[in-house]
């Protein structure tokens, strides 16, 4: 018999009896004294017995009904005991021991000695464990053991119901429940006390009562995760954006749940709630099915439309609901979506649509098919008005919805693991007579094949939408053809949206109107952004950099004074000194720059994006074939101005370089960049290109997919782009692969970057049949930054500081940022036609 004292049980963590007054006992005493509420098992049993009703044990009420906490189809938790064991439990308060086999075996006898009737838990695959035979009572939780099952509040509470427990002892995998307020509140409402051990390694040393400030609550409903089968209360699921706390699976959300989860509180105003139904085929029973669906779901149709706010930004929103006819698109769904888009166009609102649909509604035949065309026409008018449309694909998005408005967004987002496709998988299997690969027609499959822009976790979706809307609305005034009398354009900023998201405000409290300044930047009418003096540029730019803490005024002055750029002259401030050397020195400088540009420790484009692009959101894919990691493209803020950033990325380590093809873009990379350039033109955003590539990838597959065509399309696209374009060569600028991002209004090079028609090794091999003459070739080709500037190929050389960029990346990034901000300021007020004309003249002189 294990020894017990009046104050605590003297049993060590290994289960052995400890000598009285030992060090471990002293440690236990200190732990007990430090605990808020420390209990011994006898006291717990006495208090539980005092609270028992006349019939203390609910075991007699247990039946053999089929039920489970893990799966609706699995056996239910069921209490069992043979006659002798049941007699031992009679008249005693029941304590549910939530512990794995080894811990439970140690606890059962001590719990019984204290005056409890111990009840253990098990699963069918562990039904012969020793602790199950030892305990007078046992409850089966399900078929198969899992840690998630043992810490599932629903399973534990149901087990208490089965065995009639009034005390729960949490150990091992069940310990996390001691921190779950909803579980503790439900237990309190049932009169159940929950305890955790003072020491997880030695549960017999003493126990702490687990309490919550949340009022006792046992109402509300439970909801099963369709992926793992575990049940959770609705409130907990809502707080976690309806993502399963156990397996991470995404539960399908109703339109009401989506509105509550995404929009600002009480901001949703529904439009066109009731639209008359049609039955074009007089399909038998269709009208009755519609009526039954309305009664079952409380919805009028498979989509709800209206307006709301996200972080204070007004938006037209449509939410499809798969509860109603699986979200299928009939005439009413198509009509409501079309009306939503048309009204948004008239009121100049952005549109966000959450899709969830099984496709066309078969009961309406061709009329259902025509909805694809109707909505597409409305979206085309919305696009012509240069208003943003963001599509969010949820599970499932298939059929005619996929082939129309789901894939017509300026930005297409998707939730993880959502089913996305056109034809059904069964149809595909029956047609091609092949098994489909795992992960086929998922959001991840669509992202890999370049069909969507990004996969966004549900908990981050609201913030992502807010920032995307702000990036579009920030430039909306610039693309309006006319201003109505009294019209006041809304101006937004990255900081304002972030503040609203953090503080949950219902109004966009940092919006300003007209020609007022937002954080020092005049977006409206007023003083133009023509060339400024160097001192004024230093003052303005340093102030902006200080807001992020990226550089101080003193550092920026040093960057510009020690070899920055002169935006008025368009040349390097160190150019005169650098150009005084002879040809041999220049050749050596060129080869040195080649080596430095290829240095694997040199900062890559993503390092510069991290340094000075606020709130960068990467967008993926060419919408046709794939996504190319060698080109990173997306939206962000530079100096308070919304921009599109397109960069060639080599990768920061070996595995990333392999994944990004060492910065050599594929055709789909150039098509992605062209897509983002055209999007920037649509919304009046300037384009910033960061160039760093040996050259476009040359391989059979690249030729098959039209590498030359893709580069050519980029060049002609840039030539006519009606927004400012600024390019900076960060490292290597290899041939047409680099030029595809450098046909710009302003082009700059970092001082150790290089720009050439091909590599010096290739030049030497072709002309001299000797690759070892590469250093000589570098000098002959005049590929250094200073030489390119002297020839007028580039407009500025940006100093990397006293040492190369890989040795002082912050200073190099500050120099690039300063140049980009100043140049965008200079180009901002230039009319689109003049921009294009001067761009043509710039390259026509060579």
Image: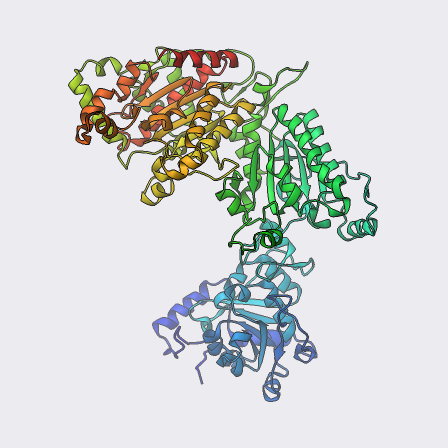
> Number of marks in the image?
0
Q: Quadrant of the C terminus?
A: top left
The foreground one among 334 and 162 is 334
Residue 324 visible at all: no
At x 57% / y 16%, what residue is drawn?
515
| Above or below: residue 129 compared with residue 160 | below
User: Within the image, what quadrant is residue 85 found in?
Assistant: bottom right
Query: Image height check: is 326 above or below 402?
Result: below
Horizontal arrangement in the rendering, residue 251 relative to residue 40 (left or right): right
Q: Position of residue 170 (x, y in %)?
A: 52, 68
Which image quarter is the N terminus in? bottom left
Question: Left or right: 17 with respect to 335?
Answer: left
Which of 10/473 is in front? 473
Looking at the image, which residue is at 68% across and 75% down?
Answer: 65
Q: Is residue 647 above or below residue 133?
A: above
Residue 501 horizontal/vertical position (percent):
56, 37
**Which colouring convention does the figure follow?**
rainbow
Of residue 484 and residue 691, the one placed in the foreground of this image is 691
Q: Is residue 751 left or right of residue 488?
A: left
Residue 825, horizontal then vertical, whole percent = 45, 17
Q: Report if residue 434 is visible in the image.
A: yes
Q: Quadrant of residue 795?
A: top left
Q: Is residue 629 left or right of residue 331?
A: left
* Residue at x-position 47% and y-position 31%: 671
The image position of residue 658, as x and y in percent, is: 35, 43
Q: Quadrant of residue 760?
A: top left
């Amino acid at each position: 018999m294990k020894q017990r004292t009046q104050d605590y049980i003297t049993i060590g963590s290994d289960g052995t009896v400890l000598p009285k007054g030992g060090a471990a006992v002293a440690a236990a005493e200190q732990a007990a004294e430090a605990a808020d509420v420390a209990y011994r098992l006898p006291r717990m049993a006495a208090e539980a017995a005092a609270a028992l009703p006349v019939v203390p044990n609910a075991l007699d009420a247990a039946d053999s009904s089929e039920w489970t906490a893990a799966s609706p189809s699995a056996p239910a938790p069921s209490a069992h005991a043979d006659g002798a064991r049941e007699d031992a439990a009679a008249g005693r308060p029941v304590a549910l021991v939530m512990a794995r086999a080894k811990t439970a075996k140690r606890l059962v006898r001590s719990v019984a000695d204290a005056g409890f009737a111990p009840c253990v838990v098990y699963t069918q695959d562990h039904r012969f464990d020793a602790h199950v035979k030892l305990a007078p009572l046992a409850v089966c939780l399900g078929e198969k053991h899992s840690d998630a099952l043992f810490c599932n509040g629903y399973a534990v509470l149901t087990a208490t119901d089965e065995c009639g427990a009034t005390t729960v002892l949490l150990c091992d995998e069940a310990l996390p429940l001691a921190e779950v307020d909803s579980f503790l509140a439900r237990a309190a409402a049932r009169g159940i006390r929950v305890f955790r051990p003072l020491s997880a390694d030695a549960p017999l040393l003493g126990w702490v009562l687990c309490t919550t400030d949340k009022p006792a609550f046992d109402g509300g409903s439970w909801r099963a995760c369709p992926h793992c089968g575990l049940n959770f209360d609705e409130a907990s699921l809502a707080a976690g954006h309806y993502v399963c706390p156990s397996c991470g699976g995404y539960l399908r959300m109703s339109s009401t749940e989506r509105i509550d989860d995404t929009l600002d509180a009480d901001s949703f105003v529904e439009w066109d709630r009731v639209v008359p139904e049609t039955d074009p085929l007089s399909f038998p029973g269709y009208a009755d099915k519609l009526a039954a669906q309305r009664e079952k779901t409380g919805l009028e149709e498979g989509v709800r439309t209206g307006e709301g706010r996200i972080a204070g930004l007004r938006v037209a929103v449509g939410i499809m609901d798969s509860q109603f006819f699986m979200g299928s698109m009939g005439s009413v769904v198509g009509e409501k979506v079309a009306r939503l888009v048309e009204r948004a166009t008239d009121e100049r609102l952005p549109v966000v649509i959450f899709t969830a649909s099984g496709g066309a509604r078969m009961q309406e035949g061709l009329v259902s098919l025509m909805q694809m065309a109707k909505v597409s026409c409305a979206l085309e008018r919305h696009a012509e008005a240069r208003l943003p449309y963001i599509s969010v694909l949820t599970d499932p998005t298939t059929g005619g919805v996929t082939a129309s408005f789901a894939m017509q967004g300026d930005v297409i987002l998707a939730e993880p693991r959502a089913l996305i496709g056109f034809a059904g998988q069964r149809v595909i299997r029956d047609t091609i007579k092949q098994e489909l690969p795992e992960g086929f027609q998922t959001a991840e499959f669509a992202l890999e094949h370049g069909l969507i822009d990004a996969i966004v976790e549900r908990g981050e979706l609201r913030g992502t939408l807010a920032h995307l809307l702000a990036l579009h609305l920030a430039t909306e005034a610039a693309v309006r053809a006319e201003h109505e009398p009294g019209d006041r354009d809304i101006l937004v900023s990255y900081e304002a949206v972030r503040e609203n998201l953090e503080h949950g405000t219902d109004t966009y409290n940092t919006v300003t109107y007209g020609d007022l300044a937002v954080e020092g930047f005049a977006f409206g009418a007023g003083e133009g952004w023509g060339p400024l003096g160097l001192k004024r540029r230093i003052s303005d730019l340093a102030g902006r950099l200080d807001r992020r803490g990226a550089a101080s005024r003193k550092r920026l002055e040093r960057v510009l004074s020690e070899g920055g750029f002169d935006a008025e002259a368009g040349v390097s401030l160190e150019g005169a000194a650098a150009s005084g050397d002879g040809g041999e020195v220049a050749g050596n400088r060129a080869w040195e720059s080649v080596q430095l540009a290829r240095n694997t420790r040199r900062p890559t484009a993503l390092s510069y994006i991290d340094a000075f692009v606020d709130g960068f959101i990467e967008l993926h894919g060419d919408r046709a074939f794939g996504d190319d990691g060698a080109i990173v493209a997306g939206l962000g803020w530079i100096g308070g101005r919304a921009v599109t950033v397109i960069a060639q990325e080599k990768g920061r380590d070996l595995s990333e370089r392999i994944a990004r093809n060492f910065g050599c873009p594929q055709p789909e990379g150039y098509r992605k960049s062209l897509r983002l350039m055209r999007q920037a033109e649509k919304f009046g955003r300037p384009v910033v290109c960061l160039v760093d590539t040996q050259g476009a990838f040359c391989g059979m597959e690249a030729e098959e997919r039209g590498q030359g065509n893709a580069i050519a399309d980029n060049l002609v696209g840039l030539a006519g782009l009606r927004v400012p374009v600024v390019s900076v060569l960060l490292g290597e600028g290899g041939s047409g692969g680099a030029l595809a991002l450098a046909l710009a209004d302003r082009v700059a090079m970092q001082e150790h970057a290089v720009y050439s028609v091909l590599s010096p090794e290739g030049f030497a091999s072709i002309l001299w049949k000797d690759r070892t003459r590469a250093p000589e070739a570098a000098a002959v080709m005049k590929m250094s930054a200073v030489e390119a500037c002297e020839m007028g190929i580039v407009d500025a050389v940006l100093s990397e500081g006293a040492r190369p960029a890989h040795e002082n990346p912050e200073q190099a990034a500050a120099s690039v940022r300063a140049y980009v901000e100043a140049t965008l300021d200079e180009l901002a007020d230039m009319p689109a036609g003049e921009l294009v004309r001067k761009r043509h003249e710039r390259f026509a002189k060579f």
